[in-house]
Image: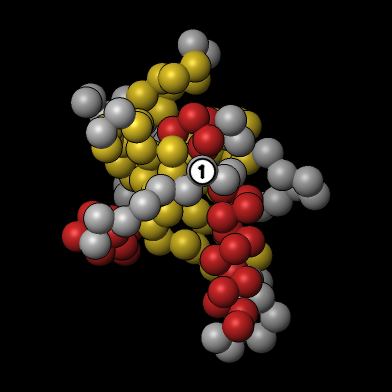
Amino acid sequence: MSDEVSPEPFLTLAPGQVWTVHANPPTTLRVLIGKIEQLGERPVVSVMLLGARAPEGFGSETLDIHHAPFDAPSLIAELEDLEAEGVEVPASFEDGYAQWKGNNGGVWTLGPAEVAGAVIEMAAKNL
């Protein structure tokens, strides 16, 4: 598969893009596209979630989730505005991606805001 996927006619994803997401209430969360691939019949988009609201006591207001793999249609349904292109994907994303790939991990079928919330809830339990 190429480095681009367009399951919907007006939306093309590519590595290095940063997108806002649909969320209620509005959020500072952003999605950085890292990799796009086909796993069996399923198009998968691996992303970095930027600016997720950190749990109380974390020591900062926001945090980044370095790798989150999404079912492409589930992700695309929640993207709102393209904010940037050509953004360098950090090495921390590559580390998370390699771990996920090595463990034959699954993919999220929720939207990015829901995934960020679930990950933060798990992190809060470990504080």
Residue in view at x 23 percent, y 25 percent: 2
Quadrant, the C terminus: bottom right
Q: Residue at x 59, y 69 (%)?
A: 120
Count of marks overlaid on the render: 1
Whole-percent x and y of residue 93?
Answer: 33, 57
Q: Position of residue 61 (x, y in %)?
A: 65, 72
86 displayed left or right of 118: left
Answer yes or no: is residue 62 visible: no
In-image side of 44 versus 115 (left or right): left
Q: Looking at the image, which residue is at 51% across and 37% down?
A: 75
Quadrant location, the N terminus: top left
Residue lying at 62% horizontally and 32% vertically, measured from the top left: 80
Q: Does 57 appear above or below 47?
A: below
Asked if one can make out residue 73 in the rendered structure from this viewpoint, the answer is yes
Horizontal arrangement in the rendering, residue 49 relative to residue 37 (left or right)? right
Secondary element type, mark 1 = loop
**Residue 11 percent coordinates (x, y):** 49, 20
Q: Nearer the viewer, residue 56 or 101?
A: 101
Q: Residue furthest top?
A: 9
* Label 1 Cα neighbours within 10 Å, binned few <14 / some 14-19 / many ≥20: some
For the residue marked with disc 1, what is the amino acid? Thr
Residue 9, compared with residue 65, is above or below; it is above
Percent across and percent down for residue 57 are 66, 86
Q: Is residue 56 above or below residue 110?
A: below
Occupied quadrant, residue 68: bottom left
Residue 123 occupies which quadrant of the picture?
bottom right
Where is mark 1, residue-wise? 109
| Residue at the farthest front position | 41
Q: How is the image coloured?
A: secondary structure
- Is 124 located above or below residue 107 in the figure? below
